[in-house]
């Protein structure tokens, strides 16, 4: 697993052996960044750690429904965990708390590549009044919870662990329970009796902690359905609840989102025949339900689907898929580039289950905006190509248009590398056909845009936006959009966000040895073409680097290039040709020049490294 650039010799040997026997040149690895946490922490009240103490009473219950990104501050005192419904597999009810090796703002606990075991995330309850005047060990108090290692992420290693701590009446913490890391398994329930009077006070708290292997695995643990109450027993494992689990499928047949004008050009083909969601009956008996579905256009308030109901029988201890026939109603566009949102609402009514009702309703917004997307906007893993040092690596995602349009740029969700990348550069590519793909006889290029660098700014939708130097008019039909990584990338391939919840084909093709191959990995690589009106590029910054000021002149040049940069220090320069192949490198100081007279005429890219910090490349023309 490629998660760190500095590893021990033994691990290096193991990884080389794995690379030799692994099929194909595609890899996935753990995420090293969670922009949802970072963006929430910067601007949303839920993302700010609360200093308010709320003393709770029994019973305590939490299934993480209704809160996203951060936990409910009226129940929890810290923000390290990630509340979501994508990192889990078959949760008890919608929403889990995910513990990993990322901190409360979504960055690695150690972003510089160090290895070792350390305490990472914690989830600490607010104080709970369990004073002996109210409750005692004789009242048979139990804490129960469900846990799942790995989920949709990567499994915690055997040296990793998940622990439960109790706070004593004297203020200290004691470890009560621990489980070692393992591969994916269904959610398991744990029953913890609280029998020692040491824990009975008006300031009792419990805390989950994960120990993680820094920069070796993502150590994913999911928590769900936490219950603390008296008058329980070790056999009190039944959950009297019927709840939604998975998020509903999109309205669209193949895309997760697309411009509304493209949808209107062929709604019959683009609309899914049915929509699906999942209902978990956690009780020990069949449950008669009334299941409702309705939809409206948020832009206009127009009813798209009046409430319709069905009365399914949900079997005991089962997760059943519920389907809904697609509605055909559309609304007219007031503007050709309008953003349109359809709100699909699903809710269930049970006459016998006594569990919470918050998890009985789920909303799914079908968004039509200025992009084509197969992904749902959340990344559970990172995708990268296993490149050869002397060969460029190309990635292309197949898309289609139903009517003529103008492509303005691309949005890419990148995963971070640890330590952070400082000098990677790539080219944006758009093709009308690929050699050997869908009958294509050659790579027919529509657009090439060089000198792009990966970005990680906490944008609203967590993607880095690249605006084309010129808009690209496109006809209806198939096209391919992606990236070209130059030959000097070596093993430092770009990490792309990878949505493993993607249903259907991923439409991805890769080329690392001179020919295109279909991706064999299930999931959507998070690269989105942008269409319609002009767009605004993301500001090119990186939290790990600061680019030095420098110049190279003249440009165009005939025989020599002059370098000017701050400070009287020596820099290392690199020159690449338009194919991304290195042609020259060496040392240079500010005010000096290099001889390029022997280079063929053409376009080149130059960058320098000063004090270990690499600059963004500059385009140079050799006459």
Image: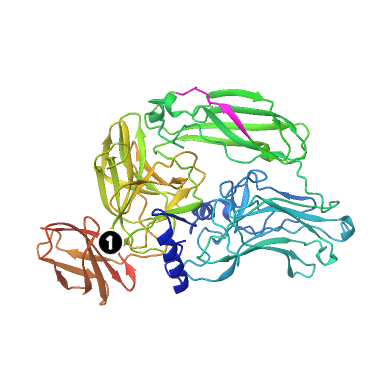
Instruction: Name the side, left or right, on which 295 lies relative to 595.
Output: right
Instruction: Name the side, left or right, on which 261 lies relative to 52.
Output: left
Question: Where residue 166 sits in the image (x, y, percent)?
Answer: 74, 64
Rendered residue at 61%/28% (across/down): 293
Question: Where residue 461 sits in the image (x, y, percent)?
Answer: 46, 46
Q: Quadrant of residue 402?
A: top left
Whether residue 589 is visible to the viewer of this picture, yes or no, is no
**Location of residue 325 with respect to 121 vertically, above or below:** above
Whether residue 263 is visible to the viewer of this picture, yes or no, is yes
**Location of residue 542 with respect to 231 vertically, above or below:** below
- Give the camera-side residue of 496 and 471: 496
Rendered residue at 35%/49% (across/down): 510
Residue that mark 1 sits on: 390
Span shown in magenta:
321-331
In the image, is residue 343 part of the stretch drawn in magenta? no
Question: Where residue 414 sits in the image (x, y, percent)?
Answer: 42, 53
Q: Quadrant of residue 213?
A: bottom right
């Amino acid at each position: 697993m490629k998660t760190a650039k500095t590893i021990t010799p033994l691990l290096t040997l193991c990884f080389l052996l794995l690379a030799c026997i692994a099929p194909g040149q595609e890899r996935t690895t753990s995420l090293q960044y969670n922009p949802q946490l970072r963006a929430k922490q910067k601007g949303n009240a839920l993302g700010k750690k609360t200093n308010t103490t709320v003393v709770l009473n029994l019973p305590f219950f939490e299934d993480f429904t209704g809160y996203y990104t951060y936990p409910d501050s009226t129940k929890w005192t810290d923000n390290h965990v990630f509340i979501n419904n994508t990192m889990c597999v078959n949760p008890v009810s919608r929403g889990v708390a995910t513990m990993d090796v990322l901190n409360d703002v979504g960055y690695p606990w150690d972003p510089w590549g160090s290895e070792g075991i350390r305490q990472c995330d914690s989830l600490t309850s607010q104080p709970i009044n369990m004073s002996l005047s109210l409750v005692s060990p004789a009242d048979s108090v139990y804490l129960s919870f469900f846990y799942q290692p790995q989920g949709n992420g990567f499994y915690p290693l055997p040296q990793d662990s998940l622990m439960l701590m109790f706070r004593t009446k004297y203020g200290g913490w004691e470890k009560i329970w621990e489980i070692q890391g393992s591969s994916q398994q269904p959610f398991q329930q744990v029953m913890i009796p609280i029998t020692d009077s040491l824990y009975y006070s008006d300031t009792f708290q419990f805390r989950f902690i994960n120990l993680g292997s820094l920069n070796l695995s993502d150590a994913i643990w999911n928590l769900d359905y936490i219950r603390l109450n008296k008058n329980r027993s070790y056999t009190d494992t039944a959950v009297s609840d019927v709840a939604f689990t998975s998020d509903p499928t999109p309205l669209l047949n193949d895309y997760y989102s697309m411009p509304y004008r493209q949808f209107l050009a062929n709604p019959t083909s683009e609309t899914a025949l049915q929509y699906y969601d999942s209902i978990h009956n956690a009780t020990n008996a069949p449950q008669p339900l009334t299941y409702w579905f309705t939809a409206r256009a948020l832009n206009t308030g127009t009813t798209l689907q009046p409430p319709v109901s069905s009365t399914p029988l949900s079997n005991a201890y089962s997760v059943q898929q519920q389907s809904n026939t697609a509605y055909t109603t559309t609304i007219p566009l007031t503007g050709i580039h309008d953003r349109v949102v359809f709100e699909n609402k699903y809710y269930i009514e049970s006459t016998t289950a006594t569990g919470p009702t918050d998890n009985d309703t789920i909303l799914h917004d079908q968004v039509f905006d200025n992009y084509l997307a197969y992904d749902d906007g959340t990344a559970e893993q990172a995708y990268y190509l296993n490149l050869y040092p002397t060969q460029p690596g190309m990635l292309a995602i197949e898309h289609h248009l139903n009517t003529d349009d103008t492509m303005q740029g691309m949005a890419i969700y990148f995963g971070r590398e640890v330590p952070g990348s400082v000098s990677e550069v790539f080219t944006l590519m758009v093709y009308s056909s690929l050699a050997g793909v869908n009958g294509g006889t050659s790579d027919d290029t529509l657009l090439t845009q060089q000198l792009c660098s990966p970005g990680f700014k906490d944008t609203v939708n967590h993607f880095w936006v690249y605006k084309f130097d010129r808009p690209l008019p496109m006809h209806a039909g198939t096209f391919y959009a992606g990236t070209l990584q130059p030959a000097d990338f070596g093993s430092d391939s770009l990490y792309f966000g990878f949505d493993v919840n993607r249903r259907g084909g991923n439409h991805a093709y890769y080329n690392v040895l001179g020919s295109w191959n279909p991706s064999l990995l299930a999931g959507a690589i998070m690269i989105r073409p942008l269409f319609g009106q002009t767009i605004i590029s993301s500001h090119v910054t990186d939290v790990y680097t600061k680019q030095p000021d420098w110049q190279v002149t003249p440009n165009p040049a005939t025989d020599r290039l002059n370098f000017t940069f701050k400070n009287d220090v020596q820099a290392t320069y690199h020159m690449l040709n338009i194919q991304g192949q290195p042609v020259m490198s060496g040392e240079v100081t500010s005010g000096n020049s290099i001889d390029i007279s022997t280079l063929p005429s053409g376009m080149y890219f130059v960058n320098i490294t000063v004090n270990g910090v690499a600059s963004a490349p500059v385009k140079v023309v050799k006459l």
